[in-house]
Amino acid sequence: MSGGSLEERLAALERRVQELEQGMRLLRRGDVGGAAPSALTDLLNLPDSMQRTMIALQELKEGNAADVAERTGRNRSVETIYLNGLVRMGLVTRERRGHRVYFRPIRYY
């Protein structure tokens, strides 16, 4: 988190705190959306960067890479890479509608 202005660093810290709080809420609920314990374990076993993408997609229910990027504060192309990785892992579905590709979690945590 080095570099950037103080405001940027504080904003990054705030985003990370929000992500951690969301993760703690998921852990406390345990049976969120009827997800099996192994589903929650799948989420927790993801790298932090992909967890962030998955949590954003969970909140959206469905979205394209630009929608997820708006939530995470990262570049759309980065989110496209993470979303396609989640598709390959079997955690997310992908559907093309015209020129856009929409992603949807298979399970909700």
Image (cartoon, rainbow, N blue to C red):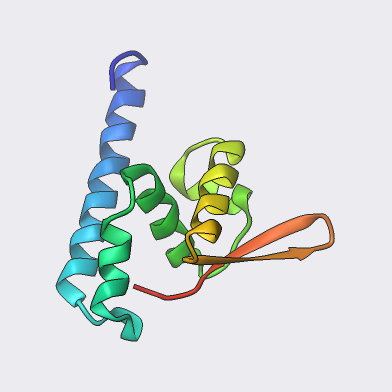
Residue sitting at x 58%, y 53%: 67
Q: Nearer the viewer, residue 19 or 84?
A: 84
Quarter that holds the N terminus: top left
* Residue 44 quadrant: bottom left
* Residue 97 screen position, x and y as percent: 79, 65
- Residue 20 lies, with reference to residue 2, above or below; the image says below
* Residue 53 screen position, x and y as percent: 44, 51
Residue sitting at x 39%, y 59%: 55
Horizontally, residue 77 falls left or right of residue 100, namely left
Quarter that holds the C terminus: bottom left
* Residue 66 screen position, x and y as percent: 62, 48
Residue sitting at x 18%, y 61%: 24
Q: Residue furthest bottom?
A: 34
Residue sitting at x 24%, y 68%: 26
Q: Residue furthest right?
A: 98
Q: Residue furthest left?
A: 28
* Residue 88 quadrant: bottom right
Horizontally, residue 54 falls left or right of residue 14, namely right
* Residue 89 screen position, x and y as percent: 47, 60
- Residue 85 lies, with reference to residue 62, above or below; the image says above
Q: Nearer the viewer, residue 85 or 2?
A: 85
